[in-house]
Image (cartoon, helix red, strand yellow):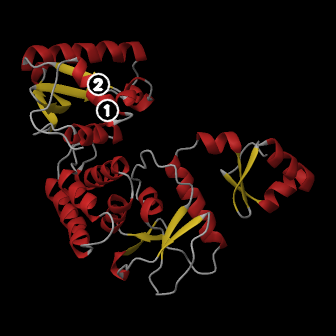
Amino acid sequence: MPARSPLLFTRAAVVADLGRAGLEAALALGSLLRVRPGRYANAREWQATYVEERQRQLFTAAREDAEVEPIAANITAAAAHALPLFRVRDERIHTVNVDGRAASSTSRCFRHDDACDPADIVRLDGRLTTSLSRTVFDVIRTQPAETAIAVIDAALRQVAVDGSGRVRDIEAAERLREDIRRHVDAGAGARGIVQARRMVDLGHPGADGPGESVSRLYLADLGFAPIEVQVRVAGPDGGEYSVDLGFAGVLAEFDGETKYRDPLLLRGRTAEQAVIDEKRREDWIRATMRRPFLRWGMADIATRGALADRLRAFHVFPRRTPIR
């Protein structure tokens, strides 16, 4: 394929570049994938692309092919709103019908017939999608709890943070929470409402990524309460640190690998210097707060039990009965 190309190719573009025989050969070899009718992708690039971008690309292709402009919903709308799709493996796009016309779902598109007020439809970057509050409601009601908590946390954070990444506008986050709660209340009795109610209460704008969100969810499931989010610690020279979580007398952080690899987070430092800086920060926090300091990573939140095992190794136990 051409060196500079979009993630998805039309059949005409592939045939022009490879020929019909070349297209069939690439499909047979697995170097090219047919990801929807008339759309193809380089297998390696497609598999290396985050699910959020795949959703955006697939919806764009569906929009170009459709006679009637589709409306993104659920996880597809979440991707449009730049919300994380933690542990989502669904390769279908999701749309919603608002004109009363029934349309069957396919292996490539899940069409929702849930009642959707036209006021909950917005145009985002030129595409029709459900509003932020309606999108969050749909996700927290229908997707696994891990996906749900990551989405509602990110949505609350999105409206509350300023340009520096600090949570400043708590009132904006609470307004969004109440908008989501109104959808939940209006959907009383629907599938997934019990989970949705819990997510509305548990959502927090302070969580800085799905790892923190799922950690907090599992801690709550395990019976830990209360759970502090972004615990503030006075730093040296009048500065300030924050620690992801506080519970059961300990401080804890979800330690994602990106902080040691992402150039934006490294801010010109080497990975080695980032590790040294993090160690100095942790030493200061330990000495200042005089509380045990724990860390865990993605492997430790593979399941709720994995996190329980991590905590048990440090003799950290909940004070109430966990959720079964």
Left or right of residue 155: residue 239: left
Q: What residue lies at 31% left-to-right and 41% top-to-bottom?
A: 214
Looking at the image, which is closer to me, 270 or 323? 323
Disc number for residue 305? 1
Q: Quadrant of the C terminus?
A: top left
The residue that disc 2 covers is 309
Compared with 313, 302 (above or below) is: below
Amino acid type assigned to the residue bearing label 2 in the image: Asp
User: Which secondary structure, mark 2?
Assistant: helix
Residue 16 in the image: above or below residue 181: above
Q: What SS does tag 1 mark?
A: helix
> Picture quarter containing residue 15?
bottom right
Instruction: Please tell me which residue lies in front, 242 or 85.
Output: 85
Q: Residue at x 26, y 14 (%)?
A: 279
User: Dot 2, crowdedness within 10 Å: few (<14), some or many (≥20)?
Assistant: some
Work out whether residue 32 or residue 159 is closer to the camera in this orientation and state it: 32
Q: Amino acid at mark 1?
A: Gly
Classify mark 1: residues with Cα within 10 Å, few (<14), some (14-19) or many (20+).
Answer: few
Task: Report the Cα–Cα distance between label 2 and label 1.
Answer: 6 Å
Residue 270 appearing in the image: no
The residue shown at (24%, 48%) is 162
